Image: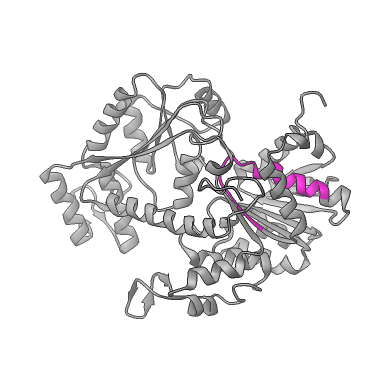
Amino acid sequence: MDGLLSRGDLHGYQQYSAEFIVEHPIAALFLDCGLGKTVITLTALEELMFDRFEIRKSLVICPLRVCGVWKNEVEKWKHIQELRLSVVIGSEKERITALSRKANVYVINRENVEWLVAHGQWDFDMVVLDELSSFKSHRAKRFKALKKVRPMVKRIVGLTGTPAPNGLIDLWAEIGILDMGQRLGRFIGGYRERFFVPDKRSREMVYSYKPREGAEEAIYGLISDICISMKAVDYLEMPECIYNQVEVIMSEKEMKVYRQMEKDMLLPYEDGDIDAVNAAGLSNKLMQMANGAVYDENGAVKHIHDRKLEAIEDLVEAANGKPVLVAYWYQHDLARIRERIGAVELDSAEDFQKWNAGEIPVAVIHPASAGHGLNLQAGGSTLIWFGLTWSLELYQQTNARLWRQGQKETVVIHHLIAKNTLDERVMAALEKKDCGQSALVDAVRARIGGMADGHGRTV
């Protein structure tokens, strides 16, 4: 047991959070990356199982890449050594074997929730949703499957750093899967009617909703008894983070091609047209073109410009030998970036190790691969967004790979924005969503005696 951390090594806010889970059969913790939500939850599980005897068997549902993190965390801490974890991943045969193992905590990836429920051996009295925002869609199969067995669960915990990535409309499903509709209502239609009005629409089709006057405060009030939030900057010594927008300007000829696509939804070529069948398809094509290349109808890549590649070269040169991480979205972005600056793609545990060891000067990573549980802060402090994403969750999670506890340098996050293109709208949307989510997080912020509340006051 030598070298293991003990319960006394937990931060005060971690002790507080674990106790919150213990005292609340339904709990939602909105915790920033790096605050240690895994050990917090395992500490609560240990107390509920072995001190209070309230639960016998629990299930953790999390992203696939994070399944192993839960098991690894147990090995670090002395006070949770009694917990026996079984990771339920792999082929169906491997999953069935893992379920049959004697354990206290079973960890499964979210894609297999439907399979687990259908498997017919549901006997978990506590469920932990590691990434509550994975259940923001009431139409998703995983949501419907978990909803069926939710009445059989005595205790449930939702963990996330992004409680409302697309606005407050997401909260109905997330809170509903926790409390079975007690706070925000049992039906999405009733929730929308009560708190929202149509925003963007086309005749009878409503694409988005905006909160009615006073709705935000009302929603916060309804959920505040089961939710607490914490921001890393309030509880950890976080490095400074600088956000920078680097404007790139396409030539008149290049902009003409972009505008034609925007107007006609079609660019004719002899060997394969570039076309978009609907608004979503057009958005996708325009974002590709802003990056400098686009797929045609045959899957071939059509080159548009090199403005962002030139900007990356300048930024890498300006880094003066310091490692740089580049976030890309499309495969043709990856190919062009690698060809231009010789970047190495981070895709395996070995790649991540090399990056953190300082052996990779320029790396590229996809936001979907840079999700939960990945620590890259040892390898560098500069991130360049080559192409943006509409997803606030993926955006924040990727940034948090470098901007987290243990980072020794000031973190600089560059965004390459093609002027007068969809890039500007995506950037504005991310900033707006972030502001909206911050209001929610502030509304349910944990108040811990003797600790600063983030505004210089002691509470």
Quadrant for the N terminus, please: top right
Outermost residue, left side: 252
Residue 185 appears left or right of 81: left
Residue 45 appears left or right of 431: right
Relative to 5, is 400 above or below? Answer: below
Whole-percent x and y of residue 207? 39, 70
Relative to 268, is 171 above or below? Answer: below
Residue 329 appears left or right of 56: left
Residue 35 lies in the magenta stretch: yes
Relative to 117, is 329 above or below? Answer: above
Of residues 117 and 168, the one drawn nearer to the viewer in this rendering: 168
Quadrant for residue 236, please give it.
Answer: top right
Using the rendered image of the protein, determine whether residue 268 is visible from the camera's viewpoint: no
- Magenta span: 28-47
Residue that appears at 61% across and 64% down:
224
Residue that appears at 52% across and 78% down:
189
Whole-percent x and y of residue 181? 64, 73
Residue that appears at 51% across and 69% down:
217
Question: What is the number of callouts on the image?
Answer: 0
Of residues 12 and 417, the one drawn nearer to the viewer in this rendering: 12
Using the rendered image of the protein, determine whether residue 410 is visible from the camera's viewpoint: yes
The colour mode here is one colour
Residue that appears at 72% across and 59% down:
156
Residue 434 lies in the magenta stretch: no
Whole-percent x and y of residue 422? 27, 53
